[in-house]
Amino acid sequence: MANRDTQLLARIARGDARAFGMLYDKYAPRLLGFLTRLLGDAAEAEDVLQVTFLQVWRRAGQFDPSRAGAAAWLYVVARSRATDVLRRRRPVVSSEAAAAKDEVGAPDARVAAGDARADVERALEHLPDNQRSAIRLAFYAGMTHVQIADRLSVPLGTVKTWIRRGMHQLKSLLEGPQEVSA
């Protein structure tokens, strides 16, 4: 069906409102769930979903099927809009508020999150320095690829390559051979 989605985007680029409705009906529920998990706020997720599809309507002609599938492109657009919201949202949290929030969370969830974080940190140590730095700046510092390129004084394409390769290596490291318990 990916080819059908590509065709829908081509029709949308020509102003076909029916094709837009079909694409919206297919992807809006999935994207809304994705955005709700990402933002943690259903109302904000709905707003971002609308902005996402407005961008799809306006920029469908920029979609390049040789670079990514239609679904991947939609998720990238949605994630980009959500990232904009998250950057604007960054509140200053007092240490007392952070401690209170930690006390409210389920202990098992905190332990699991800590274990996962430790696994990722261990896996990051196996990456080359350039990939590790780029990934930390992108995912821990919330920087865009352009900001990372500026910070590290390297071309944008280099940053994208470092992150892509690093993420593939992290995936392999984290999904490595699973131990079997007796």
Image (cartoon, grey):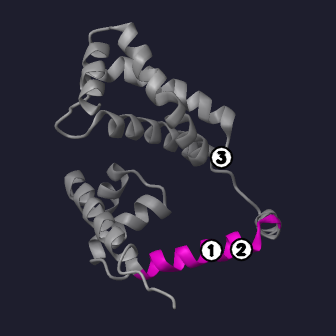
Give amino acid for label 3: Gly
Mark-to-mark CA distance, 2 and 3? 20 Å
Residue at the image position 60 percent from the left and 35 percent from the top: 45
The residue carrying pointer 2 sits among few (fewer than 14), some (14 to 19) or many (20 or more) residues within 10 Å by Cα, namely few
Q: Quadrant of the N terminus?
A: top left
Please report whichever mark, 2 or 3, sits nearer to the chain's N-terminal start: 3
**Residue range of the region highlighted in magenta in the rendering:** 104-122
Please report whichever mark, 1 or 3, sits nearer to the chain's N-terminal start: 3
* Element carrying mark 2: helix
Q: Where is residue 120 shown, x and y percent of the image?
A: 46, 75
Q: Are the residues at dot 1 and dot 3 in contact (C-beta closer than 8 Å)?
A: no
Residue 112, label in figure: 1
Q: Which residue is identified by label 2?
A: 108
Residue at the image position 39 percent from the left and 9 percent from the top: 18
Give amino acid for label 2: Asp
Q: Quadrant of residue 124?
A: bottom left
Instruction: Please tell me whether mark 1 or mark 3 is closer to you in this view.
Output: 1
Residue at the image position 27 percent from the left and 77 percent from the top: 128
